[in-house]
Amino acid sequence: MKICKVTGAEFRPYGKIITGYDNTSITDTLKAKTPLPDGVEYVASEPELEKLPVFALLAENQYGGMPVQLGWCNGHNTKLNCLEYHRDSEVNLGSEDFILLVAKQDEIKDGLLDTGNVKAFLCPAGVMVEVYATTLHYAPCSSKKGAGFHTMVLLPRGTNDEKPRIKLLNAEDKTLRARNKWLLAHKESVEAADGAVVGLSGINIDIANDIE
């Protein structure tokens, strides 16, 4: 699979680079205060990150004063498994290089997205990126064989909390997996086995042979 860079023109439909913030305080805290599991672990709100001065700046400037949460997604991973989206952009920053597997929401046809539409982008350590609300994404992937990642996740507060009880009005409603989280699972994923809607067709992408 071809792996492009978030700093290139190919990434423009999916997101953009964010500048002007103290990224070092975040990456240093990620490495010093958050774990690096063998699999993938996600924490929506991390007090060690949210007490940094840059947190208030991100809430005011990047989200226009909205309530936000600053958490992390860390570990080791090379597979797609699922794709999700929110009604708002997500902001990521890694203390190590990591790879994002992404697609576009308008590529979903009749409730299914062909994984042949998925693109891979390398995000260098220390580079902050906005992943647009219309961009499907999921857990980061390792950039090198055996390498792990510590990745910041900034989202509107409450995102990924317990799923609200809703009346199903359309097909998209069935894919609501948590608060502000719509998810399409691959049939081979743990999430599908746990009841998530199978919305990815094609192979379950694994970049293990595409990284050195």
Image (cartoon, helix red, strand yellow):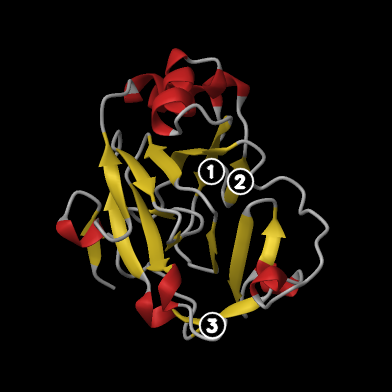
Residue 114 in picture, x, y percent from top left: 45, 83
Left or right of 160 on screen, residue 73: left
Do the numbered discs 2 and 1 sit on residues whose CB atoms are within 8 Å? yes
Residue 122 in picture, x, y percent from top left: 28, 53
* Labelled disc at residue 112: 3
* Labelled disc at residue 73: 1
Give the crowd class for mark 3: few <14, some 14-19, many >=20 residues within 10 Å. some
Vertical position of residue 138 compared to residue 75: above or below = below
At x 52% / y 46%, what residue is drawn? 75
At x 32% / y 64%, what residue is drawn? 120
Which one is nearer the viewer's eye here, 200 or 15?
15
* Labelled disc at residue 41: 2
Residue 60 in picture, x, y percent from top left: 45, 24
Amino acid under disc 3: Leu
Question: Label 1 to label 3, Cα distance in Å?
Answer: 26 Å
* Labelled disc at residue 23: none
Question: Label 2 to label 1, Cα distance in Å?
Answer: 6 Å
Question: Label 2 to label 3, Cα distance in Å?
Answer: 26 Å
Left or right of 162 on screen, residue 52: left
Vertical position of residue 89 compared to residue 53: above or below = below
Q: Which of marks 1 and 3 is in front?
A: 3
